[in-house]
Amino acid sequence: MLVAACAVWLALRLIYNSLRELVPDEAYYWVWSRHLVAGYLDHPPMVAWVIRAGTAAFGTNEFAVRFGAAVLMIATILVVIVLTQTLTTDWRPARLAGWILILTPFPAVLGTIITPDMPACFFSIGALAAAAAASRENGHKIWWLAFGVFTGLAMDSKYTAVVATGSVAIAVLSTTRGRRELRSPWLWLGLLASVAIFMPVVLWNQQHNWASFKFQWHHGSAAPSDAGTDTTADTTARLAPLTNLSIYIAGQVALYTPVLFVLGIMAIVSHWRKWSQLELPAQMVLLSATLPLLFFGVFSLRHRPEVNWPVFAYLPMTAVLAQWIVQEAKAQLWQWLGIGLAVAAGAMVIGQVPEIVLLIPTRMLATIPSRWEDMFGWQDYGRALGDRAGAATVYCTSYENAAEAAFYMPGRPEVWTISTDRPTAYDFFAGRPDPASLARVLCVTRAGASDDVPTELRGFANISREPWQTTALDRVVRRRRFIIAQR
C-alpha cells in the first residue's frame, strides 16, 4: 500500500509540476544550469546540475526543470522509511514515517519548487542513513564511505547542510560507543571523500575572492531580494531578537503544520529523556532532528530568519515521531496524529491550489500571497518582452525578472542584469555585454521605481517608457515598466 502511494505521489507530482509556471527562484537556478561552473554567488552548484540533467533528458520546460525535485523527494521519503527501520525491528514506525511525509506540505513543496534545499535534504538524509547503517552493531563499516560521499554532495548542494551531517560527528565524538567507530578506516576514507567532493566549490570561491562564502555568511542579516519578489529598503532592517525568534518559531510551526510540529517536539523531548538508553544510530537521528532547529533558532536572534533554514531537520524528526507514536501506543496520541495529518493534507492541497481564491469575495482577500502570485503571469511577461525586444539586448534591474524573461521569452535569449540592489550570480557569468556598446536596449524595472532609468542607460539619445501589467485570479499579479533605449 505504501509503495503504491509513493508511486501515485510521484506521478501526481510530475503532472502538477508541468502545469505551473516557474517561480522566480526556479528560473534563476535554471539560468545557472546554462552556465555550469563549480560554484555560484548564492549557493553551491548542485541545483544547477540537477536542473541540467532534467533539461538534457526532457528539453527546456517546467516539467524538465522540476523533474529532479520530484524524483529526489520521493527518493528522500524512501530513505527516511529505510532509516526509520534501522532504529527498530518493528516495521510499523517505518510505514508511518512514509505516510506522514506523503501527507504533509513541505515534501510536496520541495518536490515541486526546485531549490538547493531539495538536493541538500536528499543527500543529508542519505548521509544520516549511511552513518546509522555503519554504526549498528555488526553493521558494514563500508557505509562510512557512503556517508562521506553523501556529506560531500550535501555540501555541494547547500552550505548549511553541514549542520545536519555535523550532528553525526557530534554523536560519534561525544559517546564511548561512537568513538569506537573512529577505529574504522572506512570512516576516514569517507571523510577524505567528502573533502574531495566539496573541494571544487572551495577552489571556485578561492578564485573569486571567497564571494559565495562571504555572501552566505552575511545572508541572514541582509537579503533584500532573496524572497523572490520586489522589496523595499525597510526589509533589510534588522529585527529585534525576540521578534526574530518569534518569526522563526511561527515559520517552523507552519512548515511542519501545527499539530505535527507539537507532536514532533514532544517526541524529541521524550527521546532525549532516555538518551543513555538509545543505541548510537538512534542518537544520531535524534541529534540530527534537534541541532538544526536549535542552531537556526539561536542564529535567528541576530539575523532575519527564513522558514526553510532547518528544513532537513524534519526528515529525522519524522522518524523519531513515528517511532514514538508506535512505541507509546496511546489512543489519544493516535487521535492527535490523525488530526495532524488531516490538517497537513488540507494545507498541502490549499497551498498548491491558488485558484481557491476565486471562491473568496475580492473584498475579503484583495491581495494574494506573493508565492501564489509568483505562479502566474510569466508567460505573458515573456511574450510581451518578445514583442518589444526585436534585436535589442534585454536587461532587468532584478535577477528574478531577468531569469523569468530568459525562460519565457521566445527563443530563450540570454538576459542580463543592471543596477541591481545586491550582487547576483549574473555578476560572475562570462560574456556579459556592456550596455554602452549596444545600439538598442530593452530594460525591465519595477513599476513603482522612483528613478526608472538605470544609470547605465542615461547615455542613450532616445528613451521611451511603457507601463505593463498582467492579471490572474481576477487580480493584477505583476506590474513592470519597460524602457527602450536607442542610440
Image: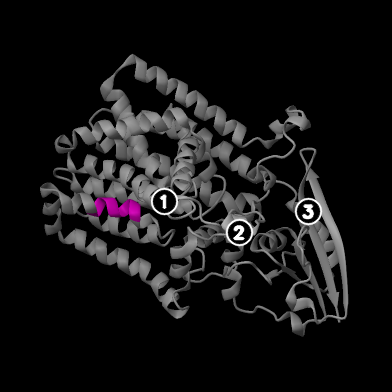
Q: Quadrant of the N terminus?
A: top left
Q: Answer few, some or many: residues within 10 Å of disc 3's Cα (few below 14, many 20 plus, some between 14 and 19).
A: some
Q: Label 1 vs label 3: CA separation?
A: 35 Å
Q: Which mark is residue 386?
A: none
Up the image or down, 237 lies above or below 425; here it is above
Question: How far apart are the two marked residues, 1 and 2, measured between alpha carbons?
Answer: 21 Å
The part of the chain drawn in magenta is: 163-169
Name the disc covering residue 479, or none: 3
Q: Which mark is residue 301?
A: 1
Q: Nearer the viewer, residue 419 or 128?
A: 419
Q: Is residue 83 left or right of residue 277?
A: right
Residue occupying image coordinates x 33% and y 57%: 151
Task: State whether residue 466 appears in this view.
Answer: yes
Q: CA distance from mark 2 to mark 3?
A: 17 Å
Residue drawn 18% across the image and 46% down it: 139
- Disc 2 crowd rating (10 Å Cα; few below 14, some 14-19, many 20+) is some
Q: Is residue 22 left or right of residue 44?
A: right
Q: Is residue 280 left or right of residue 218?
A: left
- Relative to the observer, which residue lies in front, 330 or 452? 452
Mark 1 or mark 3, earlier in chain: 1
- Badge 1 marks a residue whose secondary structure is loop
